[in-house]
């Protein structure tokens, strides 16, 4: 999730945007809840990478332009994640981001147009 927020310029991602789901029985394994309350500064050209700040740090850095791959790896290592896995996953997320946003926007637009076509 933090990799997605870094890649998508999700500057409002903070601790209250993460949740844990438990199964019906307390013996079930806890899992990270589905993504929610996601926002991105990408659609706003007036928010430059120089000015943007994350709500949570990456390797002790909050300002977008200061964050380098080593900071992401340092943050991941603190969570027990392997550096190679982290970089591979970061590349996958970055590579798929444009298509994911485009698909979501197209789907949303199509749904809204259907509603508008139905009228009041």
Image: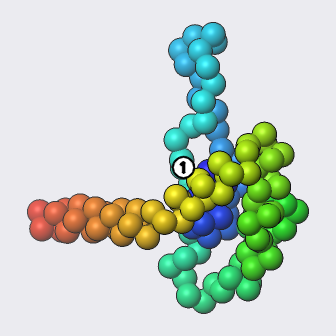
Residue 30 visible at all? yes
Across and down, in percent, residue 64 comes to 73, 75
Residue designated by label 1 = 36
* Image-based side of 64 in relation to 89, left or right: right
Q: Residue furthest right?
A: 60
Q: Where 81 sits versus 118, above or below?
A: above
Across and down, in percent, residue 119 comes to 13, 66
Q: Where 29 sits versus 103, above or below?
A: above
- Is 60 in front, or is 93? 93
Q: Where 13 sits versus 40, above or below?
A: above
Res 120 → quadrant: bottom left
Residue drawn 58% across and 11% down? 25
Q: Residue furthest front?
A: 84
Residue 120 visible at all? no
Crowding at mark 1 (Cα within 10 Å: few <14, some 14-19, many 20+)? few
Res 37 → quadrant: bottom right
Residue drawn 65% across and 44% down? 18
Residue drawn 64% across and 33% down? 20
Across and down, in percent, residue 51 comes to 74, 84
* Image-based side of 100 in relation to 110, left or right: right
- Is 36 in front, or is 84? 84
């Amino acid at each position: 999730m933090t990799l997605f927020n870094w890649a998508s310029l999700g500057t409002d991602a903070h601790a209250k945007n993460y949740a844990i789901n438990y199964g019906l029985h307390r013996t079930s394994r806890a899992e990270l809840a589905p993504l929610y309350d996601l926002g991105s500064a990408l659609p706003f050209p007036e928010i430059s990478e120089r000015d943007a700040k994350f709500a949570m740090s990456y390797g002790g850095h909050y300002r977008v332009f200061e964050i380098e791959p080593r900071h992401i790896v340092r943050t991941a290592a603190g969570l027990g994640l392997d550096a190679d896995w982290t970089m591979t996953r970061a590349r996958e997320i970055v590579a798929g981001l444009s298509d994911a946003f485009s698909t979501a926007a197209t789907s949303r637009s199509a749904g809204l147009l259907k509603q508008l076509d139905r009228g009041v």
